[in-house]
Image (cartoon, rainbow, N blue to C red):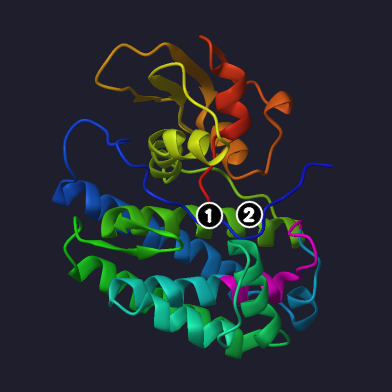
Amino acid sequence: MLAVARTPHVFEAAGAGAPGGATVSAVDSILAALAQQHGELGALLAEMSEADWRRDTRCEGWVVADVVLHLAQTDELALASAEGDYAGAVARLTGGRPATSVDDSVATMVERERGQTGPPLRDRWNTGAAALRDALGSGDAHRRVQWVAGQLSLRTLATTRLAESWIHTGDIAGALDIRLAPTDRLQHIARLAWRTLPYAFARSGRELAGPVAFELRGPAGDRWEFRPDTEPVTVIRGEAAELCLVAARRADPTATSLTGEGPDVAAVLELVRTYA
């Protein structure tokens, strides 16, 4: 069985920027996608029974309530990051307990507040998500803030929150036996996976043979290309939804139709990720 990571977080890879800077329209598009993703999750939560909150998810050891609590807590962390108090928020949510890893830290946060269900937990997530969108929308998209063990721009922080919300919305929908159709919001997540490839390789102590391009098909059949400034030596092709699931560790690349050419195809599909 594929191991499913339950604590997705992302760093902005140093030196991995795409051509051109973040434009106002690009940031607005990400924030709109984040709001839509929150809306999709909110619609699921609004219809859940008390028994639904206790359903097991594919996140090992976590029921639906634990996943929603994790999202509420990490949105609160992201809000604190945007407001310059990331370390303080971590201390509050972990009770000051030292963590040996990111997974250990988020597990501690969930364990400390586990047991909440229903409207109070849904309201907490709704309130935090709305406050986070407001903070991200009013800040300088290029300003760098603390996140996990590094720094990233507010624009990238918004994209990481979109990626995590999408991943866990899928986890919750799966627990409820609901199938969600992929949307164009995945374009931002696929771009994030492409941009952070240098980080993914460095985290595993490996090196890319050269630049990588993604040539993907969006849910509507349109072509999404993510290309470096220089000629790529490796190209990954296929469905954007499958690439995003692989990057989220929700699909084994060998079980998808993703293909490619170049020296790093297998390594890219093994290491690509949208979390730290």
In this rendered view, identify the residue nearer to me: 136 or 176. Answer: 136
Left or right, 244 with respect to 60, comes to left
Please report the residue visible at 54 percent of the width from the left and 17 percent of the height from the top: 264
Q: Where in the figure is residue 20, as x and y percent of width and height?
A: 16, 35
Mark 1 falls on what kind of element?
Answer: helix
Question: What's the amino acid at mark 2?
Answer: Gly
Q: Where in the figure is residue 126, as x and y percent of width and height?
A: 47, 79
Provide the residue designation for mark 1: 166
Q: Where in the figure is residue 25, as x and y percent of width and height?
A: 18, 48
Left or right, 173 with respect to 84, comes to right
Left or right, 248 with respect to 222, comes to right
Q: Find the magenta span and give its range.
A: 58-70
Provide the residue designation for mark 2: 170
Are the residues tagged 1 and 2 within 8 Å (C-beta)?
A: yes
Question: What's the amino acid at mark 1?
Answer: Trp
Within the image, what quadrant is residue 65 found in?
bottom right
Within the image, what quadrant is residue 80 found in?
bottom left
